[in-house]
Image (cartoon, rainbow, N blue to C red):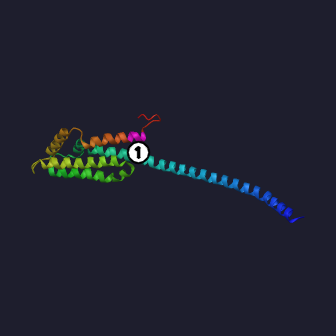
Amino acid sequence: MPLKAFFMESVTLVLEIFLPTLSIGLTAYLIIRSYLKYEESRQKIEIEKAKQDIIFPARMQAYERIILFLERSTPESLIRRIIKGNSSARLFQSELVGAVRSEYDHNLSQQVYMSPNAWSMVKTATEETIRLINISASKLSVTATAPELAENMLQITSQIGKFPTQIAIESIKKEFAQYFLTSTNGAV
């Protein structure tokens, strides 16, 4: 057998073995790669779903708690809950400010679940409520009583129109509806 024929036969034999092996290997590689990508995306979807199953209820509860906090922080609500007879206006002022700060501090962690805009409104409403209490108290004599402070607070509040707590409540309710109450057609 001449050398050229032997060489051609060897190359043909190698190609007959190598090409099918290469084809099978390449096909296996593509199938495995496709399967791994599918599994990776499936796992990401499962992780995202698990996060939503945990975070969704926590976010919903955060909005509920903040609405409750804001409702309890309205001047009318604060006065109804905290006023005790004819105590001094200074003591009443201290109790009102303490109640607002205490509830705010208790709900600080809820900001993690809310938009920065919503939390900013909560913070502003809290600061404005404390400011209202302090301004109302500063307009009274040292001997003023709690009912006088309450009356002064309500008078100032009535002149403002919508108090910041009400504005925050409305805005947060709207945001809540966007996140949690929208139907498939986008209507609330």
Does residue 172 appear to the left or right of 127 in the view shown? right
Quarter of the image for the C terminus: give it: top left
x 17%, y 39%: residue? 159
Question: How far across and how far down the image is residue 137, in percent?
Answer: 15, 49
- Residue 14 x/y as whole percent: 79, 61
Q: In which quarter of the image is residue 77?
A: top left
Q: Residue lying furthest right in this view?
A: 1
Query: For this rendering, which residue is in front, 35 or 173?
Result: 35
> Looking at this view, is 35 or 107 the one in front?
35
Q: Quadrant of the N terminus?
A: bottom right
* Residue 87 visible to the viewer: no
Q: What residue type is labelled 1?
A: Met
| The quarter of the displayed image where residue 157 is located | top left
- Observer-nearest of 86 and 97: 97
Q: Is residue 142 magenta?
A: no
The reply to whether residue 132 is in sight is yes
Seen in the picture, residue 16 relative to 117 is either above or below; the reply is below
Circle 1 sits on which residue?
A: 60
Range shown magenta: 176-180
Q: Residue at x 9, y 49 (%)?
A: 141
Instruction: Provide the major secondary structure of the magenta segment.
Output: helix
Q: Position of residue 80 (x, y in %)?
A: 23, 42
In percent of width and height, residue 98 lies at 24, 53
Q: Residue at x 31, y 41 (%)?
A: 169
